[in-house]
Amino acid sequence: MKSAIAALALALLSGFVPGFANAAEITGAGSTFVYPLLAKWSDDYSKQGGAKINYQSIGSGGGIAQIKAATVTFGASDMPLPPADLHEAGLIQFPAVIGGVVPAVNLPGVAPGALRLTGPALADIYLGRVKTWNDPEIVSLNPGLTLPALAITVVHRSDGSGTTFNWVDYLAKVSPEWKARVGEGTSVSWPTGVGGKGNEGVAAYVQRIKGAIGYLEYAYILQNKMTYALVQNAAGRYPEPGKASFQEAAASAEWSKTSDFDLVLTNAPGDGAYPITATSFILIHRTAGATGAVKGALDFFRWAFAHGDASAEALDYVPLPASLTAAIEAYWQANLP
Amino acid sequence: MSGMAIARAAPRARRLPWGDRLFRLLLASAAILVLALLGGTALAIFWGALPAFLHFGSRFLTGLAWDPVRQEFGALVPIYGTLVTSAIAMVTAVPISFGIALFLTEVAPAWLRAPIGAAIELLAGIPSIIYGMWGLFVFAPFMADHVEPALTALLGPLPILGVLFNGPPLGIGMLTAGLILSIMVVPFISAVMRDVFLLVPLALREAAVGLGATRWELVWRVVLPQTRSAVMGGIFLGLGRALGETMAVTFVLGNAHEFSASLLMPSTSIAAAIANEFTEADSNLYRSSLIALGFLLFVITFVVLALAKWLLARLSAGEARR
């Protein structure tokens, strides 16, 4: 009764009515980040005679809640669930696609990729400690660049988001102060700045406000031709964001040492690895065997890993490296015989 | 009261044909449904908000922190943002609406009244998301480049008042949100004012003019006192809309859970916080806190409307005595 009333309040407040899966239909819900790709994959898949996938992009948190309540066949989340949570809820998880979170700046006269920042410098900016672009901490990283005495306006997401999770996870890994003062999560208590709703909201604020810095999915940087900054990786280099550096991060990460792919790709060790690489995860119920809709969903992802790379790249996502998809297939065999 | 009316009508109802009785029943249930829905919504929201109220107690109303990581939620910043933006909206919208209504009823030549009236009604029909996008892409840059630097230069150095206008000109913040809100509520308030100004009996107007009243005296001494209660009603209608407006505010308010005295700084409102954060509120306490925010908005709106009703009743009682 209590949960029924809570669900009513939830539906009233969000205007969202969960779709109930029938046996034949494969339904999914969650991450808004993977939505365009899942829509494209599902379209291609059904054209080739596969089942239709009905995916609702309600956000990672919503996706986790829906799959736990078993109202959908699979959930999608931009942050991995810890194995203990997975086992408690009877779920398995595997990565589906890779992306990157890239800092975008509005600095007149600075070319895309010209500005270089380190993780600690980003953390200091987002902590509100570095307040102007000509602060010694930034100037010393960019000897060839003349930086204006412009105030820095920090832009962050106002809605909870997997993008935020990967961004603050990176900041927490490189800055002990960030870890202690702010912590990590899909939404946090920001020490400073303005909040934009969704990637498009952050992009709009960064383009509007001179001296702004925000963080965006890589695809938004490309599509809006925004000025981005390079971030130093764990190996001390400044890789360009893109397919090569994201895949290197995914390949250099030690997946074999984790269980249930519980790994966040930020600050990956590879030489050319992009430091804020993000992964979207798919959550599925652990059943006695892969039957019905669950089998349909696995068939869909198996097909997507084999044939979906071109569609993914056309939409500026980065497909998983072959070593990883092989590991996922083995994981399926082990958990869903 | 409606219960009494139904009871009184009951004996007669028995003599009516069954079709009429069925119709009466349908009408009554439609009316009662509204009450049931209102009660049900209030109850459901309160039930959802209960965990947050129990966990935080009065800290929920006075707390400044909104920290999903540490599960610490206080509603003071959203409440403050809601009240301040609505106050800015009313302070600018009421005089403008009054001016529009006066112009349309007393000053404008007859051929101009219809097109301006239609334009204002059209303004009321624009979806709020359009106001939000226009606000973000057109109005906010204009505020950032022209209005806010001028305000800071002009009013910033003043004591006390200056605090309200200091800060970087982002173009996004409480002042911009309040002004967008005022544009959104002007049609509602001015339409009500115009309609009631037109209802003032011609005999009264002619009598006032006959006594040598100027146009200003006619408006101030005859039209306004005659229509005071309806004008107040229109203002509170606008205030009700301003308090609950979500999309337009989300775009230009900055969505920062941060308390700042300056009107140029970003803040958040109750409706904007719920719209932004509900989908990803992953813990029960977080979700409950957002529902509790919704409950507070419910209470604030209810109090405002009740206050309006009470004011109206007092005013109309005063008018009747005179």
Image (cartoon, coloured by chain):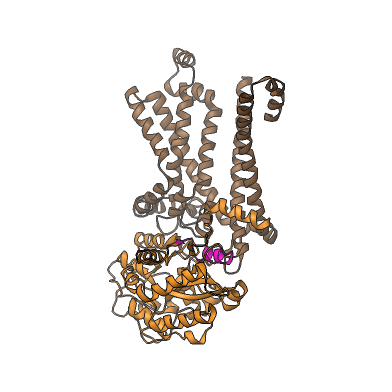
Up-down: is A178 above or below B172? below
Palette colour of chain B: brown
Q: Is residue A100 visible?
A: no
Would residue A59 be counted in the magenta stretch?
yes
- Residue B139 left/right relative to B227: left
- Residue B140 left/right relative to B267: left
Please name the residue shown 50% across and 72% down the image. A79
In the foreground, B210 or B241: B241
Percent across and percent down for residue B189 are: 47, 35
Q: Quadrant of residue A250?
A: bottom left
Over which residues does the magenta segment extend? A54-70
Percent across and percent down for residue A74 are: 50, 67
Up-down: is A148 above or below A259? above
Would residue A221 be counted in the magenta stretch?
no
In the foreground, B275 or B226: B275
**Total labels drawn:** 0
Q: Which chain is orange?
A: A
Please name the residue shown 46% across and 80% down the image. A328
Percent across and percent down for residue B156 are: 44, 54
Please name the residue shown 42% across and 75% down the image. A302
